[in-house]
Amino acid sequence: QKEVEQDPGPLSVPEGAIVSLNCTYSNSAFQYFMWYRQYSRKGPELLMYTYSSGNKEDGRFTAQVDKSSKYISLFIRDSQPSDSATYLCAMSGGNAGGTSYGKLTFGQGTILTVHP
Amino acid sequence: DTAVSQTPKYLVTQMGNDKSIKCEQNLGHDTMYWYKQDSKKFLKIMFSYNNKELIINETVPNRFSPKSPDKAHLNLHINSLELGDSAVYFCASSQDLWGAYGYTFGSGTRLTVV
């Protein structure tokens, strides 16, 4: 079993839809949770960062972390064609990760297409 | 004024050759990383350096040797290239040792071994 499992998709939605992206994980030491967006032939770009459990909102994006269920989500409201990309969840144990230090463990990525 | 820059962007080379990829960050970050992204887009850590000191060395063949001359630079040298080394290699940096504020990634080096 992988440490981080991400719904593989692909997802195809109409413009304006609400998109839900999800990851589950098995390592209870994870305490930093991130979402990255990667456009084709580009590097991953940090979208959202959350420490421990809770919600965080930034414009059209909301990240949720439920450590008790080992489950994280990213919601995109009013999705736009420019949101079409691969979305990667990532997490690390931070200073609780022991010798792993800043090692980020990624999910497999979900390809999202938003069509006009 | 790119934050994390890698060169070259593309590298096509024959099996058995030796090649290097260079990375530089101008963010003042303490920690730098090499990640490998396979054909299925899965990103996996290879190495991390903090202030020129090797911190993480995942189970990577010893044909791969990272070098950090200073905390702003992290290079990756690969000896005796194999077909299976074909992938996109990303350099990244983080403010601290734990990546607590996320990483900043470069735009990648697409390596093709023929």
Image: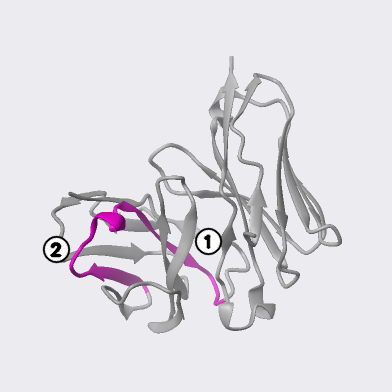
Which percent across, then down, holds residue A92? 63, 67
Residue B79 lies within the magenta run: yes
Asked whether, in this view, residue B21 is left or right of residue A93, the answer is: left
Tell me which label, 1 or 2, sits earlier in the chain.
2
Judge whether A10 appears above or below B92 on screen: above
* Chain where mark 1 sits: B
Marker disc for residue A46 = none
Residue B5 shown in magenta? no
Residue under numbered circle 2: B16
Residue B103: mark: 1
- Residue farthest along the right direction in this orientation: A68
Q: Secondary structure at mark 2?
A: loop
Q: Quadrant of the C terminus of chain A?
A: top right
Q: Is residue A26 left or right of residue A43?
A: right
For marks 1 and 2, give the CA distance.
32 Å
Q: Residue furthest top?
A: A116
* Residue at image coords 66%, 26%: A79
Q: Position of residue B50 (x, y in %)?
A: 45, 80
Residue placed at 57% from the left, 83% from the top? A99
Q: Give the magenta part as a residue range.
A: B72-97
Q: Residue at image x 55%, y 77%? A: B97
- Does residue A6 lie above or below B25 as drawn? above
Query: Which of these two is toward me, A64 or B37?
Result: B37
Residue sitting at 38 percent across and 40 percent down? A41
Dividing the picture into quarters, in which one does residue B26 lie?
Answer: bottom left
Q: Amino acid at mark 1?
A: Tyr
